[in-house]
Image (cartoon, rainbow, N blue to C red):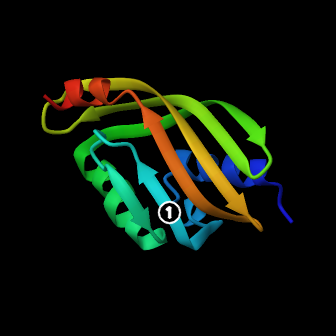
């Protein structure tokens, strides 16, 4: 079985390539994906298609060059933490954004079953105004 750290690392690698299928390769059909309150895609989305539709599609439409730059991964066994920075320009305003972020991943039996995002939503909203 692929180690949990490698599963999360492969998600980030696929994200950097814009490969949605690769990003979702190890996501459970019942995944609970939480975007922080105050973030443009705030909410908890259940299932891979809900995540794609309500997070990745929205970010792709509303932001230019939106990306996550990974700085470090912390291996906690069934929980993996990704630490990095969001980058992008908000399409409607043309303003750039850079915000530090942490992602907490929960895995069971080789599948991502939960994701939770923590970021500075003020920096994101400043780009949107």
Crowdedness of circle 1 by 10 Å Cα count: few (<14), some, many (20+)? many
Q: Position of residue 89 (x, y in %)?
A: 28, 32
Q: Horizontally, is 41 left or right of 10 in the view?
A: left
Q: Horizontally, is 73 left or right of 35 in the view?
A: right
- The residue nearer to you, when weighing 46 against 73, is 46
- The residue nearer to you, when weighing 7 against 112, is 112
Residue occupying the point 76% across, 47% down: 5
**Residue that badge 1 annotates:** 32
The residue lying furthest to the right in this view is 1
Residue occupying the point 40% across, 30% down: 87
Q: Position of residue 83 (x, y in %)?
A: 59, 31
Residue occupying the point 18% across, 29% down: 94
Q: Quadrant of the C terminus?
A: top left
Residue occupying the point 69% across, 59% down: 107
Q: Quadrant of residue 81?
A: top right
Query: Please, what secondary structure does the residue beneath circle 1 have?
Result: strand
Total count of labels? 1
Q: Quadrant of the N terminus?
A: bottom right
- Look at the picture and state if 5 lies above or below 92: below
Q: Position of residue 121 (x, y in %)?
A: 32, 31
- Look at the picture and state if 18 lies above or below 31: above
Q: Position of residue 67 (x, y in %)?
A: 44, 38
Q: Quadrant of residue 71?
A: top right
- Look at the picture and state if 11 lies above or below 22: above
């Amino acid at each position: 079985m692929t180690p949990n750290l490698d599963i999360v690392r492969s998600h980030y690698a696929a994200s950097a390539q814009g490969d949605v299928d690769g990003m979702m390769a190890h996501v459970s059909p019942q995944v609970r994906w939480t975007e922080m309150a105050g973030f443009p895609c705030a909410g908890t989305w259940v299932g891979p298609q809900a995540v794609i539709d309500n997070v990745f599609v929205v970010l792709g439409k509303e932001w230019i060059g939106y990306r996550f730059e990974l700085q470090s991964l912390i291996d906690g066994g069934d929980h993996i933490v990704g630490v990095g920075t969001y980058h992008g320009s908000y399409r409607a305003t043309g303003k750039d954004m850079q915000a530090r972020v942490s992602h907490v991943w929960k895995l069971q039996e080789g599948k991502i079953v939960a994701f939770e995002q923590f970021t500075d939503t003020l920096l994101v909203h400043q780009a949107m105004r």
